[in-house]
Image (cartoon, rainbow, N blue to C red):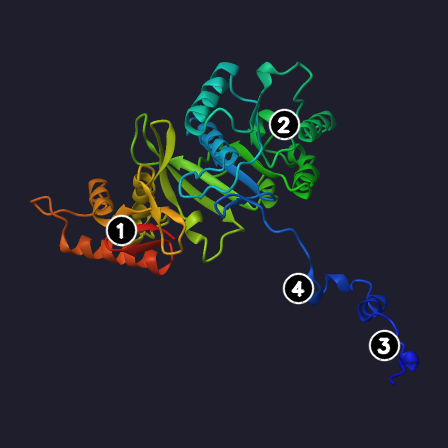
Amino acid sequence: MNDNRSDPVAAVDFAAYKAQRDPRHDLLVDAWLTRQLPERDYLLGNTICSTSRWLIFGDTGIGKTLFAMSMAGAIAAGEPFLNWGGRHPARVMYIDGELPAETFKDRMILVADTYGPEIALYGYSREVLRPDDMPPLNTEAGQKWLFREIDLVKPDIIFFDSIMCLLVGSMSEEEAWAPMKPMVRALSARRIAQIWLNHTGHNADRSFGTKTREWEMDTVLGLSKGEDDGPDATVRLDFRKARLRTPDTADQFAPCMVRFAEGRWRHDGAAAKRAGHPQSEVDMIKGAILDVYDRLAEGAQQSVGFDGKPTHKVSVDKIRDEVKSRGFLDQDDHGHITATSRSHFRHAKTKLITAKKLIESEGMVWRA
């Protein structure tokens, strides 16, 4: 019979013994390997989860509010937005300190037309609240007001539009943002995602004000003008920071062109890389294939995939024709796709299948 009474280590729980010898054992690598944490609750694709902190910036008039409110509607409805897949219906607060009430209502009508009027999207417009509501959020009164509203609404995510309009003080100085740091962390501790909108200054390529506010964020997204102009002009999306980016999700954080048309933001294809590093034709065609598939799949009849789950199959020929019509495939004098572009299309499709983005069978493709 074993008698451990002479062995002080065996006589007590080993973990307790180690903790007694090292009171910070729970911070060592082996403790982190077994630490129990909640699973990430994704709200949109693999880009936004319930602890995400985003900063979206862009020049005046670029469409930040239109973009953000459309994103908010998609998250509330649990539907896809651009090339980011829908997850589940969520509770969304949108706090706007910038638009007139009439314009804010117009934006809400657009959201309702796209995602339906029954979604849990709460729109806060300063003009329709009581005079003492929505104090500057970098004040004690403002943060008390916000957390009272959070206790009532219980949101999964909050959009703040914009930093310039919801805070008081000089936005170029650290002092105006400093009171926000504990609040930003408190929202994450409650597992409430947050998206902050900000303007640019004289330099339209960066967010206005102190750079340190980006340190609090896990994602920084820049919006800038595309090459075309007019009411349906493209907008370029560039992720300047993306902590959730992995090799498997890199395509969701890739630079791309989008445009607002027919009441909905649409992925307009991959964007050429900046700083003299043009994107390859194959990579641009990859983005175009996915965008065209998503558009055609909206009206496609459901059928069963290899795994028995319902999917929307689209003809490869239809996708090729639309990619051609969008100008991604070169044509000869007779309007036929050149041999080089046909090769690029096949290569792009093969890369998507190899990366398990698409599945192909008998001339039809669908999302994996």
- Other-residue count near label 3 (Cα within 10 Å), few / some / many at <14 / 14–19 / ≥20: few
Q: Residue at x 90, y 76 (%)?
A: 8
Q: Secondary structure at mark 2?
A: loop
Residue farthest to the right? 5
Amino acid of disc 4? Leu
Circle 1: element type: strand
Residue type, numbered disc 3: Ala
Q: Which residue is disc 4 drawn over?
A: 33
Amino acid residing under circle 1: Met
Q: Which residue is mark 2?
A: 167
Sequence-wise, the earlier of marks 3 and 2 is 3
Q: Residue furthest bottom?
A: 1
Label 3's element?
loop
In the figure, residue 269 lies in which quadrant?
A: top left
Asked if residue 194 lies left or right of residue 348, the reply is right
Q: CA distance from mark 2 to mark 1?
A: 52 Å
Residue identified by numbered label 3: 10
- Which numbered marker is on residue 50? none
Residue at image point 22% right, 47% down:
320
Q: Is residue 118 above or below residue 191?
A: above
Residues at marks 4 and 3 touching, judged by CB atoms closer than 8 Å: no
Q: CA distance from mark 1 to mark 4?
A: 43 Å
In front: 81, or 303?
303
Quick check: 93 left or right of 361?
right
Relative depth, front residue between 177 and 184: 184
Q: Are marks 3 and 2 in contact (CB under 8 Å)?
A: no
Rendered view: 258 above or below 66: below
Tell me if label 2 and label 1 are in contact, CB under 8 Å.
no
Q: Quadrant of residue 225?
A: top left
